[in-house]
């Protein structure tokens, strides 16, 4: 029988820790026990560190009992996506290239967790170097969706989404390049946010596409994510794209939770063909609820979004082919030496052949093509221009609306194996999430119930202008409250009992 | 139709320093052909004078104060190296013998 504590929201647990009703050791141990009982079935973690998590918990309990003033999240355990560097745990990015690699430094966001006194339970699974929408491209095998273990938990951050959805951790960190936080949140009934580009430091995030990557929170409630974003956000001199200014308190925005007078723009191009019936049904019901709660629903058009997937699958591979050049068998990671007396170039080629999986090779070679002199103007150059058009669409839409809204994904969770051999079908999962990365604006996925036809979670996505992340927490928390009032319970209380199996 | 031929794939893989087998070349040529055909629609979108965007939130010449900060020790920097010798990364020969 699982300890009831693990089913509570992070914000509630933070309160219990603060008041001394629950110790960090008790809470951390409850999650370690949960990992032991369901961890193997869900396969969220690539590495767990129970001993160091408990050591942190003991230290926090001691400091708290000595009367020290601690951070609001002190003592609350958390899981970290395995493309964020950690001094005391292997960091593989889901690749054989980095199997067993212990980084010589902590990512800035990891350091923030440590400074706040959060026990780190382990490192979560992802598609290799975050390239994928299902975790099926992880070199260490896929994670499973806790709502149905035969289905994908989304990707690339399916480890972080499934760990939170299966109550193995109350919070997790993810990274989002084209939807890798939001799509997994959408298909697992959890909350995930991609903050404004530069709001959270990328130092120590193993880069996929540097002009798109952003670190963000994963949780079971909007307020929980707000508290985590407040901890990890802020300027970092180690990341030259880090925004120098503060974006304000996300926690306050989530606690406000009202939509009275807010203009919500429905994106015409992201609400029609190709979206599952049950997804559209829940989406329309949410719009109705928001409207009844005093929001003004308007329609906006973003015609260039049609080209966002094409632009993304040129810009991302181009940047990735450059970023992944560092895996050259020299300074860290795998080295495979062919027979005989090979030159360094042959060692590199053999290492990259052995160390990279099929999707990574596909994208590196595609990126090399997009950047080659013959193709540059028609492909990479054109994609960068599309990025401008998409930004202009956002600017025009935000002149009419405070936030934009769409379903977060076209479908609910699909079956493991269903799309693995069709790259284009896999890429379409990100149709609603990619525009935010291309324009650098923030996006949130909030659960809005189950699709009637398959009983699986549906997510809604809100997007706000750059630096206006607070609006997402405000509208997200408001909708969450409306839904919880209608259901009489929280979203995750619909989830099946994993231990009953 | 896409211009992604097996020979082009072999050339690109060489540039990317990835050894590929003949079977991989055949498969990649087919898969990349489909992807390239699909993303080729993009040139239609940008007729006329549209500036390129390389970064979503433009910032230029980001500097910090010129102060020495702690950095990795030599031992830390070499800690992940597949091979090292006398405080340096050791690699195979750079040049062929002939």
Image (cartoon, coloured by chain):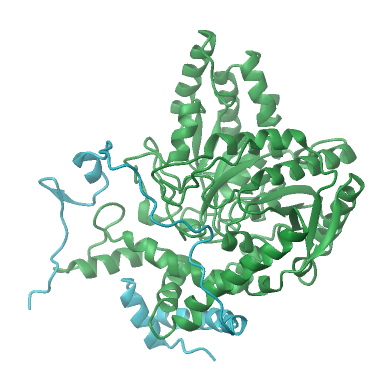
Whether residue A153 can be seen here? no
Whether residue A100 can be seen here? yes
| Quarter placement of the N terminus of chain A | top right
Above-or-below relation of A138 to A376: above
Q: Residue at x 45, y 22 (%)?
A: A55
Q: Position of residue A485 (x, y in %)?
A: 87, 37
Give the number of callouts: 0
Above-or-below relation of A395 to A205: below
Query: A258 or A109: nearer the eye?
Result: A258
Q: Specify the farthest residue to the bottom.
A: B1
Tell me the colour chain A is drawn in.
green
| Quarter placement of the C terminus of chain A | top right
Query: A324 or A53: nearer the eye?
Result: A324
Query: A271 or B21: nearer the eye?
Result: A271
Q: Residue at x 63, y 68 (%)?
A: A390
Q: Answer with left or right where residue A427 lies relative to residue A407.
A: left
Q: Which chain is cyan?
A: B
Q: Position of residue A383 (x, y in %)?
A: 53, 74
């Amino acid at each position: 029988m699982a300890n009831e504590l693990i089913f509570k929201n992070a914000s509630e647990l933070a309160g219990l820790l603060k008041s001394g009703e629950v110790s960090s050791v008790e809470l951390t141990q409850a999650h370690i026990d949960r990992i032991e009982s369901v961890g193997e079935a869900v396969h969220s973690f690539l590495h767990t560190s129970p001993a160091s998590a408990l050591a942190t918990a003991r230290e926090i309990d001691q400091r708290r009992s000595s009367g020290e003033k601690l951070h609001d999240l002190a003592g609350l355990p958390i899981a970290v996506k395995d493309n964020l560097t950690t001094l005391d745990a292997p960091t593989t990015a889901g690749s054989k290239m980095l199997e067993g690699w212990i980084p010589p430094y902590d990512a800035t966001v990891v350091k923030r967790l440590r400074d706040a006194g959060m026990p780190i339970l382990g490192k979560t699974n992802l598609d290799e170097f975050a390239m994928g929408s299902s975790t099926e491209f992880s070199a260490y095998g896929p994670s499973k969706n806790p709502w149905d273990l035969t289905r994908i938990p989304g990707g690339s951050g399916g480890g972080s989404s499934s760990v939170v959805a299966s109550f193995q951790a109350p919070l997790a960190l993810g990274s989002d390049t084209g939807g890798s936080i939001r799509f997994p949140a959408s298909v697992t009934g959890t909350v995930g946010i991609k903050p404004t580009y530069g709001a959270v430091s990328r130092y120590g995030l193993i880069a996929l596409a540097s002009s798109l990557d952003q670190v963000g929170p994963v949780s079971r409630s909007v307020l929980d994510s707000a508290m985590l974003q407040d901890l990890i956000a802020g300027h970092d001199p180690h990341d030259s794209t880090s925004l120098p200014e503060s974006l304000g308190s996300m926690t306050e925005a989530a606690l406000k939770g009202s939509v009275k007078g807010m203009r919500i723009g429905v994106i015409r191009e992201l609400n029609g063909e190709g979206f599952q019936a049950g997804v559209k049904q829940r989406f329309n019901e949410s719009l109705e609820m928001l409207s009844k709660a005093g929001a003004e629903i308007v329609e906006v058009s973003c015609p260039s979004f049609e080209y966002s997937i094409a632009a993304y699958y040129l810009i991302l591979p181009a940047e990735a082919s450059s970023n992944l050049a560092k895996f050259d068998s020299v300074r860290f990671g795998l080295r495979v030496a062919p027979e005989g007396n090979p030159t360094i170039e042959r060692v590199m080629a053999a290492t990259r052949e052995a160390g990279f999986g099929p999707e990574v090779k596909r994208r590196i070679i595609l990126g090399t093509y997009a950047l080659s002199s013959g193709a540059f103007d028609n492909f990479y150059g054109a994609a960068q221009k599309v990025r401008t058009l998409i930004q202009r669409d956002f600017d025009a839409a935000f002149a009419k609306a405070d936030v934009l809204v769409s379903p977060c994904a076209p479908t609910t969770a699909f079956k493991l194996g269903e799309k693995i051999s069709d790259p284009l079908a896999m890429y379409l999962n990100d149709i609603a999430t990619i525009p935010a990365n291309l324009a650098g604006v923030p996006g949130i996925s909030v659960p809005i119930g189950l699709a009637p036809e398959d009983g699986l979670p549906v997510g809604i996505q809100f997007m706000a202008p750059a630096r206006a992340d607070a609006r997402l927490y405000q509208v997200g928390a408001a909708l969450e409250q409306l839904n919880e009032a209608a259901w009489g319970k929280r979203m995750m209380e619909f989830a099946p009992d994993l231990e009953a199996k | 139709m896409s211009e992604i031929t097996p020979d082009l794939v072999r050339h690109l893989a060489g540039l990317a320093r990835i050894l590929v087998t003949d079977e991989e070349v055949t498969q990649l040529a087919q898969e990349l052909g489909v992807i390239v055909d699909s993303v080729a629609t993009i040139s239609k979108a940008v007729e006329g004078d549209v500036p390129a965007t390389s970064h979503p939130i433009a910032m230029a010449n980001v500097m910090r104060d010129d102060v020495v900060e702690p950095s990795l020790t030599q031992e830390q920097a070499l800690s992940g190296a597949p091979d090292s010798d006398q405080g340096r990364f050791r690699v195979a020969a750079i040049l062929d013998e002939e």
